[in-house]
Amino acid sequence: MSVPLLQDKVVVVTGAGRGIGRGIAIMAAGHGAKVVVNDLGGAEDGSGSDSRPADEVVSEITNAGGEAVASYATVTDWDAAHEIVETALSFFGRIDAVVNNAGNLRDAIFHKMTEEDFDSVIDVHLKGTFNVSRAAATHFRAQTSGCFVNMTSTSGLIGNFGQANYAAAKLGIVGLSKSMALDMGRFRVRSNCIAPFAWSRLIGTIPTATEEQKARVAKIQQMTPDKISPLAIALISDAAQDVTGQIFGVRNNEIFLFNQPRPTRFAHTAEGWTPDLVLERVIPAFQSDFLPLERSGDVFSWDPM
């Protein structure tokens, strides 16, 4: 009988009370991990709190013979984020992986977005990823091992309407994850991103006023949150010990590897550039390689497989 992929590993999953986080927590436990199920239990916009979502996932794991403990701390607060990690240490004696999945949505067209809308989403997604990761980093360094799996989004990687706050946070997570991989690589700590396509209560805020919108939502509903879990579990496992600094995507039964920004064209002048020369030579030379202003649906134009 083979040893489970995550046998005796201790995994913290934030936002694990519902959706993608719930699926990852349950599958991690099914593969032998001891899981800290962290969830504030807030509404889609991040307001409020409720212990029931985390408790229900813990009950599901323990009823199936696994080990799990609930954490209701918010990822947006430095001290509370450290409490999440301390929960792993107190109950299970160590920490081996962090899945940064906690999130909220406050969609608005940019010129109507409020400061509160922007700050709330940045705090949960970007600052929350930093807070929990930084709390775990000290322990990862001491034990010279560890793994971060960070949730990004094609809203940041590609673009979307009405999500300037979410896109900024999610693309910021890519930069943060890459920096974590670079800074902690010497301690054998890995950090990767996943851009998930999945129907969840956050995506459930998409409007369905027109037939086109209804058809779009129907396609998205095929992409259940549990489709994301296999990649996350694989990345946490020791079998992926050489995988770090990468951006993956999951859409139903498809897995993608995203490229990362690199120079694609080059221009040089020995005399130095003036604005007029840039307009005369550089812009026309580069223009055929300019990327169009696209949304996720323009790039992923085929139905989920």
Image: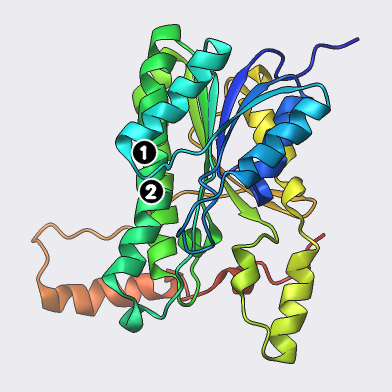
Inspect the image, locate mark 1, and give the three-letter code of the amino acid beneath it: Phe
User: How many marks on residues?
Assistant: 2
Say whether residue 258 is left or right of residue 224: left
The residue identified by callout 2 is 126
Is residue 268 depicted above or below 130 in this figure?
A: below
Residue at left offset 54%, top offset 44%: 101
Residue 275 seen from this side: yes
Q: Are marks 2 and 1 in contact (CB under 8 Å)?
A: yes
Q: Nearer the viewer, residue 71 or 162?
A: 71
In the displayed structure image, the side of residue 191 where residue 179 appears, left or right: left
The quarter of the displayed image where residue 228 is located: top right
For label 2, the SS is helix
Residue 202, image x, y percentages = 59, 63
Extreme residue toward the bottom, this view: 210
Q: What amino acid type should be assigned to the residue bearing mark 2?
A: Leu
Q: Residues within 10 Å of mark 2 (few under 14, many from 20)?
A: many
- Distance between the Cα atoms at labels 2 and 1? 6 Å
| Residue 132 x %, y % | 41, 33
With respect to residue 276, does 87 lie above or below? above
Q: Quadrant of the C terminus?
A: bottom right
Q: Is residue 9 left or right of residue 49?
A: right
Quarter assignment of residue 296? bottom right
- From where the camera sits, is residue 262 visible? no
Query: Horizontal and vertical percent for residue 117?
Result: 36, 68
Instruction: Please give the name of the residue rendered at 61% of the width and 75% of the height, measured from the top-left corner.
Output: 206
Q: Residue at x 36, y 70 (%)?
A: 286
Considering the image in quadrants, where does the N terminus appear? Answer: top right
State whether residue 150 is above or below residue 104: above
Depth order, front residue of 86/280: 86
- How many residues crowd mark 1 within 10 Å: few (<14), some (14–19), many (20+)? many
Residue at horizontal 40 percent and vertical 59 percent from the top: 121
Q: Which residue is mark 1?
A: 130
